[in-house]
Amino acid sequence: MDEAKLHEFMGKLVGDMGGAAMMASVIVGEELGFYRAMADGVAVTSDELAKRTQCNPRLVREWLSAQAASGYVEHTDGKFQLPPEQAMALAHEDSPVFVAGGAVVLASMFLDKDKVVAAFRGNGGLAWGDHHPCMFSGTERFFRPGYRANLVSSWLPALEGVVPKLEQGAKVADVGCGHGASTVVMAQAYPNSRFFGFDLHKASVETAKQRATDAGVADRVQFAEAAAKAYPHHDYDLVCFFDCLHDMGDPIGAARHAFAALKPGGTVLLVEPFANDRLEQNLNPVGRMFYAASTFVCTPNSLSQEVGLGLGAQAGEARLRAVFLEAGFQRFRRAAETPFNLVLEARK
């Protein structure tokens, strides 16, 4: 045994255990409003933060100490300060890098542990709708900042000829729309177009309807409960799959249905978690996060459905291309990317 290697690994393991504990701390701090109360950048004592948030002073002091130990806040002379860089990620929900709200996805992974263990010991299946409710709200809050930051400004413009259609008035299907974050962003940007969101999860569809009403776009947005292979064919100009195709049991069938639903010359916008094509290329922090999420959520959901292809969240461009070519598309390319997303275009 290499003792140096053992000590190196133990250091990594302790660091990961501390990181996991800190994510629980982030979830609590976000829910209690601690980060928002410190977003002005003014240093505060633990008693002052407790008073602002009407929380127990002793627990607030312990929470702040953990935050300082992790470098999430800064500590000087008994006062704690949230720097502006950390505030962008932890306090400002309209920030493109806000992640605190989405951290509750991690909570659901722990809360659903027994269900995942049963899936491992059984047929591998755990349906999306069987997760703890915080999975659904957390997923919306995790992805929404990225959609707001990139969808209209860079992803849609990267597609061939799509923006002019949206500006003039297009028909758009958002398949696997969840709470409708992506649908609402597009509807707000393109008032001449009509948008149709489809999802298998009834509760998410109802939430999406409320999101459209709250955003003032309900007159141009419709949401309905429907599978990716069963929503109505209505000659769409654009069919979108945002971070969902790899979760489906039959992604080839979903892509084939999209092909049939599109007008001639129509486009599919496929947004997937960033991944290279080989495992060795994904052994990095982003790959680690997505493989773990795929173990608990994405792959079990696929295995719970018919076909159960189990692409997983790290499918990679080559496997996704093969799905769309088998479905009948002739043109498929990478249109854009971010450190967390592949943005792919398929054309009929």
Image (spheres, rainbow, N blue to C red):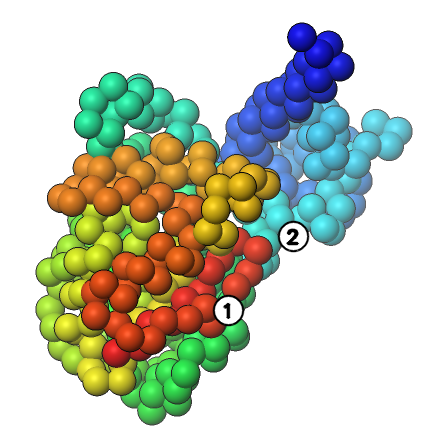
Residue at (25%, 19%) from the top-left corner?
121
Q: Report whether 254 appears left or right of 341.
A: left
Any part of residue 121 in sight: yes
Residue 59 seen in the figure: no
Query: Looking at numbered disc 1 in the image, what kind of residue is underneath it?
Result: Ala
Q: Position of residue 188 (x, y in %)?
A: 39, 75
**283 up-or-down from 211: above or below:** above
Badge 2 amino acid: Met
In the picture of the structure, the residue carrying the numbered disc 1 is 336
**Residue at mark 2:** 88
- Residue at (13%, 77%) from the top-left corner? 234
Q: Looking at the rendered structure, which numbered label has been put on residue 279?
A: none
Viewer-proximal residue, 313 or 29? 313
Q: Please report whichever mark, 2 or 1, sits nearer to the chain's N-terminal start.
A: 2
| Measured Cα–Cα span from mark 2 to mark 1 | 24 Å
Q: Which residue extends farthest right?
A: 77
Give residue 259's position: percent from left, percent from top. 20, 72
The N terminus is located in which quarter? top right
Q: Is residue 174 or residue 49 the one in the foreground?
A: 174
Mark 2: give few (<14), some (14-19) or many (20+) Cα within 10 Å: some
Horizontally, residue 199 falls left or right of residue 41, namely left
Quadrant in which residue 240 is drawn: bottom left
Image quarter where the C terminus lies is bottom left
- Is disc 1 surrounded by few (<14), some (14 to 19) or many (20+) residues within 10 Å? some
Asked if the residues shown at circle 2 and circle 1 are in contact, with their CB atoms under 8 angstroms apart, the answer is no
User: Could you say whether the residue bearing mark 1 is in a helix, strand or loop?
Assistant: strand
**Percent position of residue 263, x then y:** 20, 82
Residue at the image point whose x is 47% and y is 79% from the top = 157
